[in-house]
Image: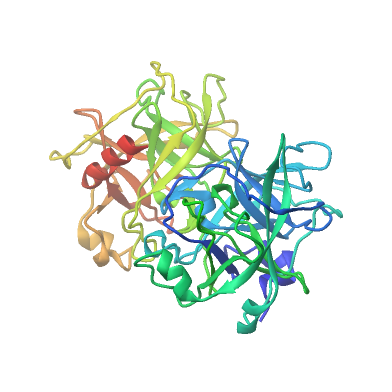
Amino acid sequence: MSLLAEVEPQKLNIMWNKLMILPLCLCVIINVAYGKQGSKVVGGIPLTYEEHYFVASVLWQGVHVCSGTIINEFHIITTATCVTNEENIIYTNLQVLTGTFNQNDFGQYGKIDDVEFVIIHDDYAPLEFWANDISILKLTQPLVYSIFRWPIKIGNRRRDNRYKTTIMVGWERFLNEIKLVEIKLSLKYEIDCQITNEGFNFHPSQYCYSSSVHSRTKTSSGDSGNPVITVKQKYLFGMVSLVPLEPVHDFIIIINIPFYKTGYGKKADKLTGGTSVLIEEYSFQVSILWQGYHVCSGSIISELHVITTATCVTSDKNIIYGNLQILSGTDYQNNYDGYGEINDVGQIIIHDDYAPREFWANDISILKLEKPLLFTVAQRQITIQKTLPTVMKRKTLKLIGWEKFTDDYVRLSQVDIKTALIRECSKFYVNFYDIHLGQLCYSTTSDAQKISNGDSGSPMVTLKNRAIFGIVSLVPLEPNNHMFIATQTAFYIEWIEEIMKLN
């Protein structure tokens, strides 16, 4: 059995096809709360970076939010709490700083790299005392190894490892600098943690630790993801997850994570057989970009929010695309006319009950932008219809997407759609009879009109009241299939309004 610790880049580069992880997490417990600030270790022993060359600082909007550990040239291991605000609210536009023992060093030795994927453990459960609190960040470009930047091996699952001498590596403020430090840890009895955490039920893989030096040594919010290593073999043994709010506590917990497998993936194909339209007609339409390329569509529902599907922004349920952007205000998907505006996505909010393995039930998500849009005639919001459309006659319903009309550009396009009969839809979707209440089957009205993978998230609108009533969820793989499954936005109106209000 090959461990993540063996640093096999070839295997890890395809981890979303078959990801196998055997990590251990270290959580600091004691009345923890969501939301993080980049606080630091207190009372640690200063280090040079050659001693702990595997440590990374995870940045969001250029500010340290937590730590990570280099496990190979493409991958950083950290906690799920590091990269999420809540279970289904994921930070995007993340970066990592490596190669320096000074958190303010962005040039001499330190190097910043962008995060391409955020991969969260399938069974991460913050409401069950943050069980399985682990994630992996895949970088856009491979790290350049040096004596200051090198991976660490992950230790085995032997039970006696928890009795070995371990240290935690983190960041501490010294006057105007924030530098790497280490703190020795010692194993505690479970009862010690339970006394200070009333109602806490240990996960089978969790063990209680605390500082073994003195009471002045503490951890705090920005220490999430701090690596914990065995001193003698220098293996990665765990990482800090949750930290105490009360300064009198310093208990921490070890978590053992089982193997898991994931993997889907999609390509950005386009609508065919539609009619080109101007952006002024459908000014709410956006193209969602990943690494500068269209992956799916979305709709502006406020100056800060874009609605789309969960399948659009995930490669699998817990593999989320990082560094997403939206392109709005243009007829052309490549901004051929130069009028388009690109904005960064700050947060991705996925429906709590999104279930890709249950016929993609609750396939809906909301993107929160880092800055508000400036509304114009070519860029403005659309209202969400609160009830399903009652008039289903031909040409009353439209699907808006992107179509390749020439080799040079892809333009905004529309096709006519209608509701499909159950017996017709079930011919193409084997599990159609397991359809969720929030889903419905539709088809195009012409054999010449088809949709494909890149149309996920495309809005469906009524011409009568110009409101969105659905978004494309599942698209056909068969070339002669005109059927597709849509998420009925009216079914989720309360969830949508709540997310927009809270975020």
Compared to residue 170, the image places residue 344 above or below, namely: above
User: Taking 223 as reference, is 377 left or right?
Assistant: left
User: Taking 173 as reference, is 262 left or right?
Assistant: left
Residue in view at x 32 percent, y 41 percent: 499
User: Taking 207 as reference, is 128 left or right?
Assistant: left
Q: Report whether residue 16 is seen.
A: yes
Of residue 19 and residue 40, the one placed in the foreground of this image is 40
Q: Position of residue 255 (x, y in %)?
A: 53, 70
Q: Where is residue 22 in the image (x, y as percent from the top left)?
A: 60, 73
- In the image as oriented, which residue stretches furthest toward the right? 147
Q: Position of residue 58 (x, y in %)?
A: 63, 47
Residue in view at x 68 percent, y 49 percent: 171
Q: Report whether residue 275 is seen.
A: no
Of residue 480 and residue 243, the one placed in the foreground of this image is 243
Residue in view at x 41 percent, y 38 percent: 298
Q: Please, which colouring scheme is shown?
A: rainbow
Residue in view at x 63 percent, y 57 percent: 226
Quarter of the picture holding the C terminus = top left
Quarter of the picture holding the N terminus = bottom right
Number of numbered labels in the structure image: 0
The image quadrant of residue 129 is bottom left
- In the image as oriented, which residue stretches furthest toward the top? 377
Q: Position of residue 196 (x, y in %)?
A: 42, 64
Of residue 219 and residue 388, the one placed in the foreground of this image is 219
